Image (spheres, rainbow, N blue to C red):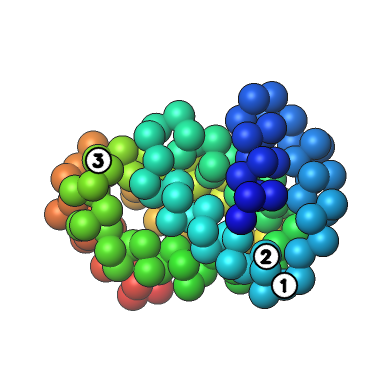
Amino acid sequence: EAAVARILSYYTDDLDDEALVLDWEGLGFSDAAARRAVADLLVRGFMEPVARGRTLAKALGVLFRNALVPEDAAFTPLRKCLDDLDDIIVDNPHAKEFFFVLGEEAMKERNKAHWAFTPLVKHHHAFMITSGLSADGLRALHAAARRT
């Protein structure tokens, strides 16, 4: 959606969390629209170059920490992205960097955050250790996350 792209462009320029919160609130999204936006941002994050992917992960962190999107909005789209990880890494070898920063965001203020995808949080430290691995290593990490 153009409005989301616009406010993310502003966020990319200044990394102002408070402005992102105000701009997002100004969109007046329903829960369904917020879920679609989160799904789109997750897919984009896995496909973006490193710097833009990091910024998207940080923006998602701001949205979740401030309860601006449904707390379980990321679970299904993230699982889909992880299911497609082999193909994603072929297209964008930097996808694992987005996942890494997303994990960092999930760990921030964990008790106050509204992140409902526990496998990402639980396996973040394992991902830090294996972040240099190939798609096979990431696939093994994903398999471990699916068992939780």
Disc 3 element: loop
Left or right: 82 as drawn, with respect to 18: left
**Position of 35 relative to 127 (above/below):** below
Residue type marked 3: Pro
Disc 2 element: helix
Q: CA distance from mark 1 to mark 3?
A: 32 Å
> In the image, which disc is placed on residue 113?
none
Which quadrant of the rendered structure holds the N terminus? bottom right
N-terminal label among 1 and 3: 1
The x and y percentages for residue 40 are 51, 59
**Position of 100 relative to 26 (above/below):** above
The residue that label 1 is drawn on is 31
Give the residue displayed 67% in from the left and 33% down from the top.
Answer: 11
| Of 94 and 24, the residue lying toward us | 24
The residue that label 3 is drawn on is 93
The x and y percentages for residue 138 are 24, 53
